Image (spheres, rainbow, N blue to C red):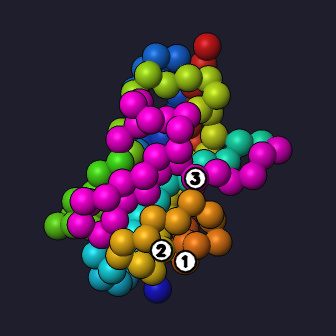
Amino acid sequence: QLQLVESGGGLVQAGGSLRLSCAASGRTFTSYVMGWFRQSPGKEREFVTGISWSGGRTSYTDSVKGRFTISRDNTKNTVYLQMNSLKPEDTAVYYCAAANSQWLIGERADQYDYWGQGTQVTVSS
């Protein structure tokens, strides 16, 4: 079982920045593609970004390209999401997820096997 714990959420003004972290434990971190999803009230969970086991491949949803950056430190079993130029529409609960794959970065929630508990990000206008 892989355990994922997110941190770093909070309240920020539009145009500001936040960095989310997701610490993994329990299994070999490099066996997994890691992703970030988000969900706001009344909406389905949506893919934000993902990263391959080595960090060599990444994928972003169009709405965050150029503003968000995913990275991972395999020595610390941690994946990060740097969020810049935040907008009110980025407000959501952000979830870290792990897929039992090293290269395929899926964009559907059902392609991921493990999930964190989520961290709230609120962007005020």
The relative height of residue 107 versus residue 112 in the rendered view (above or below) is: above
Between discs 2 and 3, the one toward the N terminus: 3
Q: Position of residue 33 (x, y in %)?
A: 39, 69
Alpha carbon separation for disc pair 2 and 3: 13 Å
Q: Amino acid at mark 1?
A: Asp
Mark sitting on residue 5 = none
The relative height of residue 41 versus residue 72 in the rendered view (above or below) is: above
Which residue is denoted by mark 1 in the rendering?
Answer: 113
Alpha carbon separation for disc pair 1 and 2: 5 Å
Mark sitting on residue 47 = 3
Q: Amino acid at mark 3?
A: Phe
Q: Quadrant of residue 78 in the image?
A: bottom left
In this view, the residue farthest toward the right is: 42
Between discs 1 and 2, the one toward the N terminus: 2
| SS label for mark 2 | strand
Q: Which residues are magenta?
A: 42-69
Residue 99 falls left or right of residue 52: right
